[in-house]
Amino acid sequence: MKRSSTICAQCCGSPKVGEKCRKGNKVHLAVDALGHLLALCVTAANEQDRAQVSELAERVQAETGKTVEIAYVDQGYTGENAADAAEEHGIKLEVVKLPTAKRGFVLLPRRWVVERIFGRVSRFRRLARDYERLPETLAGLHYVAFVILMLKNVAEILA
């Protein structure tokens, strides 16, 4: 399951042609059905989600030993290029879409796992805002947050 989350900084000046006016970083995550981190990619907030599919799919397959066959993604990863990039690594993308007659809160199948992870990670103070200048630092802090979350699960199991 893949999804991205934008961590906002302050608004920028005038954007370049074809770019959004968005400062900050975007975190792309791939997690398994239990919410365990498989791959993480940090990019600039003005980059498209679909452009990161190839790198994220490659990292997922390297981490899992090429056992992932299907990935549930949100609507930011739609399009032929994204599907082709994932197919190169042996992954079929299934887009989880909102129902057309949405009324109130709708729990989307499979997507709630990633949303829950982003909710848990956003409770960490350093990850709530975009304080970091380097994407490597932000990725490292996300890894630390996931280690803390995993240790919490292990402690509950052992207790």
Image (cartoon, helix red, strand yellow):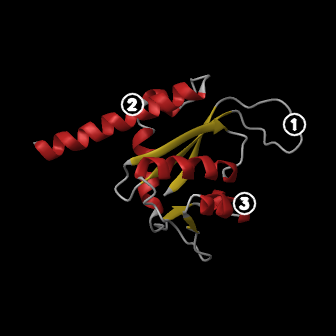
Residue appearing at x 46%, y 57% in the figure? 66
Whether residue 79 is situated above or below residue 2 in the rendered picture: below
Q: Which of pointers 2 and 1 lies earlier in the amino acid sequence?
A: 1
Query: Eyeballing the image, is 91 above or below 143?
Result: below
State the residue at coordinates (55%, 27%): 136
Are the two marked residues, 1 and 3, in contact with CB atoms closer than 8 angstroms?
Answer: no
Residue 67 is situated, as x and y percent measured from the top left of the image, at 42, 60
The amino acid beneath tag 2 is Val
Q: CA distance from mark 2 to mark 1?
A: 34 Å
The residue positioned 34% from the left and 56% from the top of the image is 34
Q: Which residue is mark 3?
A: 81
Q: Quadrant of the C terminus?
A: top left
Q: Nearer the viewer, residue 115 or 83?
A: 83
| Tag 1: amino acid | Lys
Residue 157, relative to residue 97: is it above or below? Answer: above
Residue 16 bears which disc, if any?
Answer: 1
Q: Which residue is mark 2?
A: 144
Crowd class of label 3 (few under 14; some 14 to 19; many from 20; radius 10 Å): some
Contact between marks 3 and 2 (CB within 8 A): the answer is no
Q: Position of residue 11 (x, y in %)?
A: 73, 32
